Image (tube, helix red, strand yellow):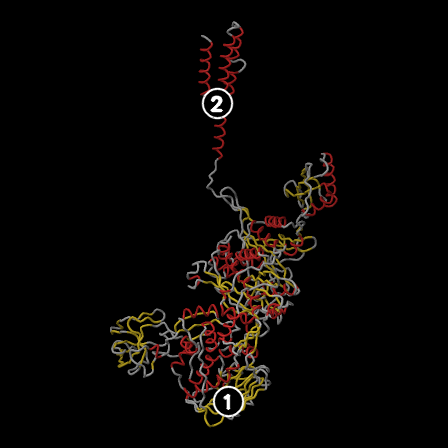
Amino acid sequence: MDIQTQLQALAAEAEAALAGVAGTNELAELKAKYLGKKGPFAEFMNQMKSLPNEEKPRFGALVNDAKNALTARFEAKRITLEEAAVAAKLAGEAVDVTLPGRSVPSGVRHLLTRTIEEIEDLFVGMGYAVMEGPEIEQDLYNFEMLNLPKSHPARDMQDSFYISEELLLRTHTSPVQVRTLLEAGGNKPVKIICPGKVYRRDDDDMTHSHQFMQVEALVVDHDVTLADLKGTLLVLARKMFGEDRQIRLRPSFFPFTEPSVEVDVTCHKCNGKGCPMCKGSGWIEILGAGMVNDAVLEATGYDPKTYQGFALGMGVERIAILRHGIDDIRNFYTNDLRFNRQFR
Amino acid sequence: MRVSLNWLRELVDVPVDAVSLVKKFNLMSAEVESHEPMTTATGLAVGHVLSCDPHPDSDHLHVCIVDVGGERLQIVCGADNVAAGQKVVVALDGAVLPGDLRIKRSKIRGVESNGMICSLDELGIDRKYHQEDGIHVLPATAQPGSDPLKTLCFDDEVIELDLTPNRGDLLSMMGVACDVAAMLDGRTTFLLPSVREDHARNGLTVASESPDCRSYYARVIKGVRIAESPAWMKARLIAGGIRPINNVVDVTNYVMLETGQPLHAFDYDKIGTGRIVVRAAGADAVFVTLDGKERTLLSDDLVITDGIRPIALAGVMGGRDTEVGETTTNILLESAVFDPIRIRKTSKRLDLRSEASIRFERGLDPARTKLACDRAAALFAELAGGRVLAGVSVYESQDIRSHPVALSIAKLNAVTGRVYDAAAIADVWKRLGFESVEKDGVFTVMVPTRRPDIRTYQDLIEEAVRISGYHLIPTSLHAAAFNGSLTELQRMRRRIRQTLCALGLDEVVTYSLVPPAEAVLFDAVAAPAVRLLHPMTEERSDLRHSLVPSLLDVLEYNLKRKAENVRLFELGKSYSLSGETELVAGVLTGNCQESIWQRRSEPYDFFAVKGLLEALFATLSVPGVRYLKPSAGHALLHPGVCAELRVGDRPLGIVGKLHPNAAAARDLPDAYVFELRLGVLFEASKPNLTMREIARFPAVKRDIAVVVDREVDAATLIAAIARAGGKTLADISVFDVYEGAGIDAGKKSIALSLTFQEYSKTLETAEIDQLVARLVKALGQETNAVLRT
């Protein structure tokens, strides 16, 4: 048999043996058998020594090519086997991804908190500071310095919880405005919002709560105008109720502002066409506002000849009720988690 | 204020429909609360009952033949008072009555009925305006077939205005008419009353001894006959929200609705003296008002007297002894102005708020006091056959001239941010009926007495803006730049909320007012809570010291509704007269780790809750919080599973397990609570501002286990090790605690992991061995701890 035939026979035999290999150990053994030091190729190299010199190159090339080819076949087989092993391992590790995840509880902020923070962020972005004050307040700050002397009929608008003759639970966050103005000393501009809890003598029902949250805003400077108030209200209305909203002002009365206005926003449910939400009018009343009454400026040490300002005040529950279609104000204070957790 | 549209149209030009008028009111004057017809009934006709016979198959029904104008209808009627010859209101076949009651031809117990004879109730007239049972009987002059709503003067619409306290001027039809004239640029038509006086003179004298009486006008009318008022007057009173009584009372109320001036009619014959003296009640301590109730007076309550005894509580209510009744023939008519604050105090104290007292409180137009007196006298003559005695008895101390208020156009523009021109402003004053002159850009406006609310230039600005229109005001934003930002405390509150939410707690907001017992329930030592002077209920009477009881209420509420693993927190205040303390409190129950297909559930225990707090303190950069056994017992907490928290020596709060008794009392499962002072957290918060070097040499860990007496707590061990370990000992943590087999009774084994770190070199094993030996020795000396081998 010539060398070519022998090599072909050897390749065919090795190929047949490779086909039956299932594991990497078996493959290593087989590789040692064919390509190892005592294998057939070592034998061929011995044979070459006895050949005439002119035949050696061809013989050598044939043997080397055959050896390289077989080595490549073993390498290919090794890769195939390893890949199969990895695939089998991975297949064994597969999980049912539709099973539930292990729960990591995550709580929710209260809707009132969320709403207040949203309003705070809007105003802070416009340069307002956030001011706070006590809830047990002096009649002086809650009423008298706000142009509400004792026995003023407008005190009926805010029936109060008194603690003593001179102390009460604040009925609005306006006393924080008074305290801030007094603190500022009559010669500095003031630009603040005052969020917080307030209390009024109301029986709790679907639309009334003896405790609720307010956010008020106050700007006092030399040149603050009603137009500035209207512009600010428009920004607020659009932030809270959507970019397409319009507002309108209607005459109203608060002792601490003059002129005083009620602010309506176009209904966000029907876009002003009229629906049950806005009782067919297309408008929803959202808050009260006005230009600071000179009496308040004077009481807090500001000269109304050189300073003027605006103030606005909203009920946070009302804003949230309108935005989220809440049917009963008591939901905010019952804290049924099935309610609280709806608003993340 | 309820405004009759028919009446309004008599007083002012209203060239628009009711819907447009309502819109104008809303945008320019006062908010419209409601707008509706006096009755929504349709399909009505005046009927003449020709015959009325008993129903053959009923003991209370009648079968009537009714002429409804050219047609005779058989109608079955159940009313007791129906009778032949009456003129009645018939709802014809197809009529719709209020409440969507549809009238159809039908058979009632076998007898055909072609309509219904109506009562006032069925026309939708509220019971507060009438007491009629049975069908309503019309005057004999009513024409069969005509519209009975016209006969009754019910063919009217009512616009109800929700008035703010400053607009007392709109508590009269005349005042509303003036504002409508301004809104619509129309004209008012007020007829001046003409009184035909008798020859006989009124010999009455009127005086006041109190500054609280501003003016007092009185007339005497003799020979009145008490009777029912005519339909038009009754209808207008009903439209105005007042129940018709009799012609004398009705006239006083009608003129009050018209002019805003409350009037009072006394039975003149019951005033013996012919004198009226207004004065403070003084020594007169009790007075019986016309509702028969005995009222206790304060010495400064204002009373009307006959010179001897009180006959009325000024502005609030008349007296029983001088009340007008069925037999009254001679009347003393009072038209007066009293101090608003005086009236407000008395009426509020006695809980006697009336249409009259509200008007006194809001302020009257002094120019209408005499006008109202004359108007009522004229109506007494016209409707009750009275003779008005000559002369008005008067006490008057009021200024009834217009008062000037100045407003410059420059100021108006500066305040509104809009440029107004002088002509437009002058037009506003003209429409309002205010005389004005302009000089050098300054308007001097003569404000009539009917508008006492207008006192300053700001009040004039409001008038100018509302009458010219708020829609004309442009929008702008105040341009000055300010440093708007949250304070550190405000930012910390937000971080606390975010952290606790991220740790799985839900935020709640509860009421600050709680029952008295609950207000102090979580106090270690009961201190009195701040209590309201006049609570509405005992449930909301005291200001709470702690948030925990309210959180337990919310927990109980949610558990009853099958919620599981309830974790709640709240930020709120503790209240006392010396100040308000901000708190953050929480309650946790159920599992901190849910059972799921792979794992077992893990219930909350003390250390799970402590771990949450430690995560919170880490987030807030609050180091060195100490947990101590409470110094005082805490009724709500398990005595062995609770800790007082301190930062340095400052009390920070408390954490612990709800006492089993407290839990059982509310049927609650195991629960853990905490309450921290926000102010202490804030002051203890020390966020790092300067970078610290990162160690370049490896840290070395060593674990040791020591056996100590059971009573020695971990903090004591750690403190002793820390003192001995010095700078090199970077961290100490407990990783195991063991009692039981292999450890003597009364002892425990604590395993600690120690981390050593040097910044300048790598620590050698020998050095660490030495350090550990020193630590163990120190521990032995301080705590009797022995290295466990």
- The circle drawn on residue A95 is none
Q: Amino acid at mark 1?
A: Val
Q: Is residue B514 visible?
A: no
Are discs 2 and 1 both within one chain? no
In this view, the residue farthest toward the front is: B440
Q: Position of residue B637 (x, y in %)?
A: 61, 56
Q: Amino acid at mark 2?
A: Lys
Q: Residues within 10 Å of mark 2 (few under 14, many from 20)?
A: some
In this view, the residue farthest toward the bottom is: B200
Give the secondary structure at mark 2: helix
Nearer-the-camera pick, B427 or B548: B427
Looking at the image, residue B529 lies above or below residue B117: above
- Which quarter of the rendered picture does the N terminus of chain A lie within? top left
Nearer-the-camera pick, B39 or A71: B39
Nearer-the-camera pick, B786 or A80: A80
Instruction: Give me the chain letter of mark 1.
Output: B
Q: CA distance from mark 2 to mark 1?
A: 129 Å
Looking at the image, residue A153 lies above or below residue B292: above
Residue bearing the label numbered 1: B392
Q: Is residue A325 visible?
A: yes
Residue B552: image quadrant is: bottom right
- The circle drawn on residue A77 is 2
Q: Position of residue B42 (x, y in %)?
A: 33, 72
Q: Position of residue B622 (x, y in %)?
A: 65, 50
Residue B212: image quadrant is: bottom right
Instruction: Answer left or right for B509 relative to B703.
Output: left
Q: Residues within 10 Å of mark 1 (few under 14, many from 20)?
A: many
Looking at the image, residue B295 lies above or below residue B785: below
